[in-house]
Image (cartoon, grey):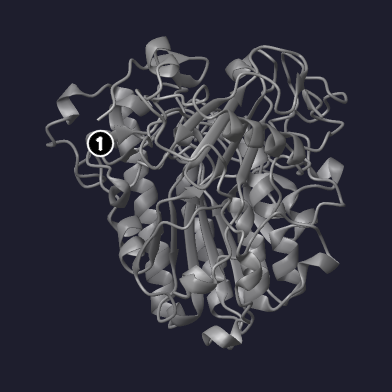
Amino acid sequence: MKTSAFIRSAGLIAVSAAAVSCPPQPEAVYPDRLIVPGEDNGSKAVKTAADYGITQKPNVIFILLDDAGYGDIGCNGQTYFRTPNIDRLAENGIRFVNHYAGAPVSASSRCALLTGKTTGHSFIRGNLEFGSGVGLYPSSVTGEGQKGLPASEYTLAQLLKENGYNTALVGKWGLGMPEEESSPSDKGFDKYYGHLCQRMAHSYFPDHVWENDAEVPLEGNTGEAGSIWLHDEFEKKTAEYLSEFLSSQKPFFFFGTYTIPHGALQIPEGKLNDVEYHPYTTAGWWSKASEDMKRYAVMMHRLDLTVGKIIEQVEASGKADNTLILFSSDNGPADEYGADPDFFESAGRFGEERLRGIKRALYEGGVKVPFIASWSGKIKPGVSEHIFASYDIMATVAQILGTDLSEKTQTDGLSFLPVLMGDTANQKQHPYLYWEFVGSEPSEGGGPRQGVRSGDWKAVLNFGEVAKAKAGEGAIELYHLGDDPGETINLASVYPNIISSMRRIMSDAHENTLFFPQIEK
């Protein structure tokens, strides 16, 4: 096992200088060239949904957590708190161990998921506040909401709605306001309930939420406390929408973008030590944990109960065999509002190695997230090592529907329907996965950065606190995930040809954008 001194800094977990500068000795063990995955994609058969026995449009339920790490669920190694219902999804479906969020923060991650584009091509590449000037990031914002998706951005919800689906969202949006015509109602959802603004979603006792472009007051809530704990309302609205959809003859898309465990670690009064609410008060770790960590565990358990109720509602309807359930998170774990990803090892482990980094980092812990796909009678249970990202969702749904996306939008995604159906021989592979991230200010989280995974090679370029950065230019770190999943040994000095290839990818994968000009060609 490799060892390193972990140092928390600006939202990242860095390794000691010795670990970074000392590659394996005395000789290199890998070819000094990038062996690009997907070079045989042209030989893969392209099958229709009917070829896989899919004869009717399936219902799609997507449960997306907020700031939950790869290691925050039981089936991915969490041992402190339990997630039996999420684990049940995994037992009855496919648990993916190499799935990545489209970005290390919420807005750009959700944009990548819903539009099928990497952050090198997508409209939103960071958390840009509503009302900000072009390329400007105010130090304080008093308004509500973030810069939204323009009319030109085609979404997964629009794709499904145009194919005859009922569509609904419960939870956090963060991709625009009604004033910009970029609320969920403008981007393909028939109905929605929850937060439009990411900052408002920091509280579980907000004084209002939004429902179908109208503010709904939550009387008595102050942001810090109140009688209405928002996740209870999310669960009620979920049951309401699903009841309506499951009784309809039309297929449906339900997007549950729940805020747990994002933001303030707030739970209903009296629930911290309520053994009927959660089972942890007699666990050995409970007496050693901070109150914040206890709340974190309670919130994750409460979210898992919601997942269980969704599963039960679908099964009771008799439509489980025509319902695809997907489960994931928008980025890695956060260390904000009292959360401590070290305590629960929320970023996760691969074997003995702990994944490096948290939210905002492009190391594995910042972007590798849980992903489960369950579809009764269609998906054979198992574990998959397929390497893919959230921007593949739209292409997968399009293949299920038999829709040509090129008529509507240009995506970066590849359908992973073959691997869902057990047809790994015909699964196309990405030559690389790409990320870029721009903080709300140059100082936040250490400035702009780029990341690439190609096969087992991972390259990370942190530009530091600069106003402008040139794509692919700077000190690139290089890791071999096959032998070093914890990204502890920087091999950049040993493999110059691979570094050169990574620079080209970082330049080619990036397009300049007006609203996020910190990285340019």
Q: Is residue 380 above or below residue 255?
A: below
Q: Inspect this view and state whether residue 190 appears.
A: no
Q: Position of residue 113 (x, y in %)?
A: 64, 51
Q: Quadrant of the N terminus?
A: top left
Q: Position of residue 29 (x, y in %)?
A: 39, 36
User: Going 58% across and 50% down the picture, which residue do you hit?
Assistant: 36
User: Going 41% across and 56% down the picture, which residue do you hit?
Assistant: 385
Along the viewing direction, whichever of 362 and 218 lies nearer the viewer: 362
- Counting the numbered discs, the total is 1
Whether residue 71 sits left or right of residue 171 in the image: it is left
Whether residue 128 sits left or right of residue 193 in the image: it is right
User: Going 53% across and 60% down the picture, which residue do you hit?
Assistant: 62
Q: Inspect this view and state whether residue 479 appears.
A: yes
User: Where is residue 501, by image quadrant?
Assistant: top right
Tag 1: amino acid: Glu
Q: Is residue 500 above or below residue 417?
A: above
Along the viewing direction, whichever of 448 and 505 lies nearer the viewer: 505
User: Going 81% across and 52% down the picture, which residue do you hit?
Assistant: 153
Along the viewing direction, whichever of 405 and 150 lies nearer the viewer: 405
Q: Position of residue 84 (x, y in %)?
A: 27, 56
Q: Quadrant of the C terminus?
A: top right
Q: Position of residue 366 (x, y in %)?
A: 49, 33
Q: Is residue 156 above or below residue 490?
A: below
Check disc 1 and report its element: helix, strand or loop.
Answer: loop
Residue of label 1 = 352
Whether residue 115 sits left or right of residue 28 in the image: it is right
User: Where is residue 352, by image quadrant?
Assistant: top left
